[in-house]
Image: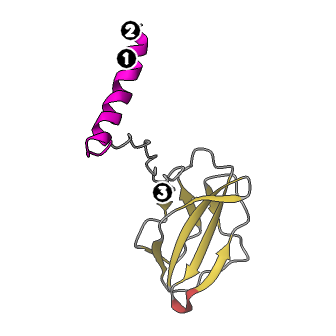
C-alpha cells in the first residue's frame, strides 16, 4: 500500500496544481551530451635541422615518433616561389637523408612531417625553416 501512495502522491500533486490554475512542474531535462574536442593522436616534433639552421649542406632530417603511426612523409618546400622541392615516399623510420638526386638550392626552405596510419594522415608537425647557404 505504501508503494502505491508513493507513486500516486506526486501525480496527485501535479493534478491538484494544474486544477488550481498553477502550472505543472517542468519535466526533468534529458542530459545533454557535451561535445568532446578532438585531440591529436600525438605530436610530431621536428628535431633536425632545427628552426633557423643555416648551412651549405643540410641533408639529414629527424623527427619524433608518434604513437600509433605506421609511417611518415616528409615535405620540403622552397620558401621562394612556394615550390615543393621533395616529398618523400612513406617512411617507417623517424629520420632520413635526402636522396642524392635532390639538390637543395641556396635559399630558405621549410619542412614538415605528417605521421600516417593505415595510409591516412594522423597528425602533421608545425613547419620549421632552415636555409641553405652558398
Q: Which element type, helix, strand or loop, lies under badge 1? A: helix
Q: Residue 20: horizontal and vertical position, in percent?
A: 26, 41
Decide which of 90, 21 is in the foreground and name it.
21
The residue pinned by badge 3 equals 45
Q: Earlier in the sequence, mark 1 or mark 3?
A: 1
Indicate the position of residue 95 as horizontal and vertical percent values: 61, 56
Q: Can you say whether 75 is above or below 48 in the image?
A: below
Instruction: Identify the residue at image location x=42%, y=11%.
Output: 3
Q: Is residue 12 magenta?
A: yes
Count neighbours of disc 2 (C-alpha within 10 A) and say few if under 14, some if 14 to 19, many if 20 or more: few
* Residue position marked by numbered label 2 in the rendering: 2
In the figure, is residue 81 to the left or right of 73?
left
Q: Looking at the rendered structure, which numbered label has been put on residue 6?
A: 1
The spot of residue 109 in percent (x, y) is 51, 80
On screen, residue 131 versus residue 92, left or right, reads: left
User: Contact, CB < 8 Å: mark 1 with mark 3?
Assistant: no
Marks 2,1: beta carbons within 8 A? yes
Q: Please say whether residue 77 is one of the residues in the magenta stretch.
A: no
Amino acid at each position: 500500500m505504501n508503494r502505491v501512495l508513493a507513486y500516486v502522491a506526486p501525480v496527485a500533486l501535479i493534478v491538484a496544481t494544474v486544477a488550481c490554475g498553477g502550472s505543472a512542474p517542468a519535466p526533468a531535462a534529458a542530459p545533454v551530451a557535451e561535445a568532446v574536442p578532438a585531440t591529436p593522436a600525438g605530436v610530431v616534433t621536428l628535431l633536425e635541422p632545427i628552426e633557423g639552421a643555416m648551412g651549405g649542406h643540410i641533408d639529414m632530417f629527424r623527427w619524433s615518433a608518434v604513437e600509433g603511426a605506421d609511417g611518415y612523409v616528409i615535405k620540403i618546400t622552397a620558401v621562394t616561389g612556394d615550390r615543393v622541392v621533395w616529398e618523400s615516399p612513406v617512411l617507417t623510420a623517424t629520420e632520413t637523408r635526402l636522396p642524392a638526386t635532390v639538390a637543395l638550392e641556396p635559399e630558405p626552405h621549410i619542412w614538415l612531417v605528417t605521421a600516417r596510419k593505415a595510409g591516412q594522415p594522423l597528425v602533421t608537425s608545425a613547419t620549421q625553416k632552415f636555409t641553405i647557404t652558398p
